[in-house]
Image (cartoon, rainbow, N blue to C red):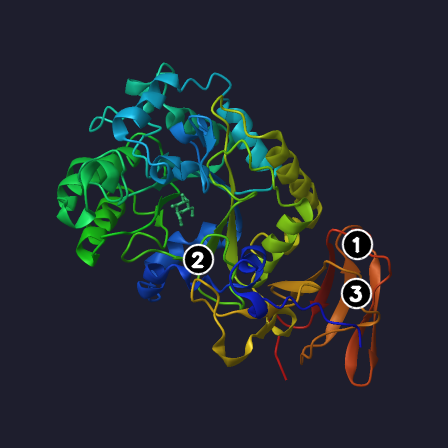
């Protein structure tokens, strides 16, 4: 039997996890999101319809942190680019001076939306206000925003919303509801404002966060979703104030799983892909290199093949992939990010049928197996011995087998009661011979497979759903 591809992460939990966590962690890193997992609700299911079809979205982290790009006073500050204020740490009075230098003259929202389209992405989520407190939109409740505090003076989000409307792209807003390092009562800035426990957090929520979410739901057309994050100090009651705002203003807007109370779908930990499939709606937010906000020194890009694998892996487990880019301070998305996204987009142009609106695997054995004795990674999520040879996604009467390596030939289909009608390659519809042997249905897949990055074989079967023996 052909050697199975096993990625064994359990041996070195720690440094090694950096490399394999993306493939092996289950999605439960965000304990709060897990705790508030919603029960089935018909209104929510209706809101989720487009999201379950979309499968692949563009995340954009952009803000003042793109100017230092990971360096402060000539020193590289380790960590995520957008966390530079916290990691250095930089006093508010110094950090806010960056606003006077924010002038992204090369910002072209139509090009950004076009990139997302070329990439095969079906929605965009952009940081409207990240933890540093700076808003990329005109706000009446805080002058710390792109229109009032920068030489650029134009509303970044309005321009993007208009471009999305022109190009028929859904747009959502990331909003850091709890952490706001610019505000004395917001969570997170202890170097200027002392411990969080002593702050009047509700004053911050009422004076800035809640009204700003209202502003986002007022001036930018239909908002596909509000992507809350890091729910520190968020009680159920505080969370409900946000859901009330969203539901009353735009009932179709989705709420992610990181508000701190009820959301519409489960958000996994960053870059965390569950080991198993699930029928609930969920999403993995993920980086294309290591940072979210632009860092000049982070050029460790994931390859198109890695991105394609993660996308199919996620879809085969029932989830969505929200893949991030970090534009530079001048408004340009780094060229390597663009090239990688477009390469995957070209693959999707041919093979998108296996992705958009596709359901999870009816099998599961191909995903791998849980590590023994309930072993956990550093986040506390179960570890998996992940297999990476192939994945399968579904539509009524069809199975899409995506191969990432040359398959064993003939390829034995996992056991199912349904009769197989026919099989063919998605790329050119060339027939694949179906035969039986030793009680198994076998596919005579021609080798080498036509696309070494990922090749899809469609198997049509009797009935709508796979029946397992
Ligand atoms: O702290 C943020 C981080 O900067 C980034 O925005 C990610 C995206 O999922 N969310 C938080 C960490 O989980």
Q: Quadrant of residue 334?
A: top right
Coordinates of residue 324 in the picture (x, y in percent) = 51, 41
Q: Quadrant of residue 185?
A: top left
- Badge 1 crowding class, 10 Å Cα cut-off, few under 14, some 14 to 19, many 20 or more, is few
Q: Is residue 284 visible?
A: yes
Q: Mark 2 = which residue?
A: 268
- Note whether ligand 1 is within 8 Å of mark 3: no
Q: Quadrant of residue 371?
A: bottom right
Coordinates of residue 441 in the picture (x, y in percent) = 77, 77
Horizontally, is 127 left or right of 289 in the view? left
Residues at marks 1 and 3, CA–CA distance in whole angstroms: 18 Å
- Of residue 440 and residue 3, the one placed in the foreground of this image is 3
Q: Mark 3 = which residue?
A: 407
Coordinates of residue 323 in the picture (x, y in percent) = 53, 45
Give residue 429's mark.
Answer: 1
Q: Is residue 403 above or below residue 373?
A: above
């Amino acid at each position: 039997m052909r050697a199975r591809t096993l990625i064994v992460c359990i041996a070195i939990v720690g440094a090694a996890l950096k490399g394999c966590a993306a493939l092996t962690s289950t999605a439960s890193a965000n304990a709060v999101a897990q705790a508030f997992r919603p029960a089935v609700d018909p209104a929510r299911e209706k809101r989720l319809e487009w999201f379950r079809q979309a499968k692949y979205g563009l995340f954009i982290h952009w803000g003042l942190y793109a100017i230092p790009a990971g360096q402060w006073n000539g020193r590289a500050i380790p960590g995520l680019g957008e966390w530079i204020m916290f990691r250095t740490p930089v006093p508010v009075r110094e950090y806010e001076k960056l606003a006077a230098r924010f002038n992204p003259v090369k910002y072209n929202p139509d090009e950004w939306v076009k990139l997302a389209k070329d990439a095969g992405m079906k929605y965009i989520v952009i940081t409207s206000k990240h933890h540093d407190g700076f808003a990329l939109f005109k706000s009446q409740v805080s002058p710390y925003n792109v229109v009032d505090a920068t030489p650029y003076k134009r509303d970044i989000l309005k321009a993007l919303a208009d471009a999305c409307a022109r190009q028929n792209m859904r747009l959502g807003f990331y909003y850091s509801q709890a952490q706001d390092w610019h505000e004395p009562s917001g969570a997170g800035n202890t170097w200027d404002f002392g411990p969080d426990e002593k702050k009047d957090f509700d004053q911050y929520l009422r004076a800035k966060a809640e009204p700003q979410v209202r502003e986002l739901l007022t001036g930018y057309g239909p908002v596909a979703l509000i992507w809350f994050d890091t729910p520190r100090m968020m009680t159920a009651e505080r969370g409900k104030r946000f859901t009330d705002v969203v539901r009353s203003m735009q009932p179709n807007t989705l709420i992610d799983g990181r508000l701190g109370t009820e959301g519409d779908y489960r958000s996994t930990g960053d870059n965390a892909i569950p080991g198993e499939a699930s029928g609930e709606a969920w999403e993995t937010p993920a980086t294309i290199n290591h940072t979210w906000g632009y860092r000049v020194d982070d050029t460790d890009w994931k390859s198109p093949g890695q991105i394609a694998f993660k996308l199919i892996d996620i879809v085969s487990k029932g989830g969505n992939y929200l893949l991030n880019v970090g534009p530079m301070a001048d408004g340009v998305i780094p060229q390597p990010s663009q090239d990688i996204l477009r390469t995957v987009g070209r693959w999707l142009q041919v093979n998108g049928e296996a992705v958009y609106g596709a359901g999870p695997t009816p099998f599961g054995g191909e995903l791998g197996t849980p590590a023994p004795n309930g072993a956990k990674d550093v986040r506390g999520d179960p570890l998996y011995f992940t297999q990476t040879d192939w994945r399968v996604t579904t539509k009524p009467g069809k199975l899409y087998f995506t191969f990432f390596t040359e398959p064993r030939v003939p390829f034995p289909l996992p056991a199912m009661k349904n009769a197989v009608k026919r099989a063919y390659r998605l790329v050119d519809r060339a027939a694949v011979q179906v035969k039986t042997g030793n009680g198994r249905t076998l596919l005579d897949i021609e080798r080498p497979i036509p696309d070494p990055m990922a090749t899809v074989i469609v198997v049509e079967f009797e009935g709508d759903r796979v029946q397992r023996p």
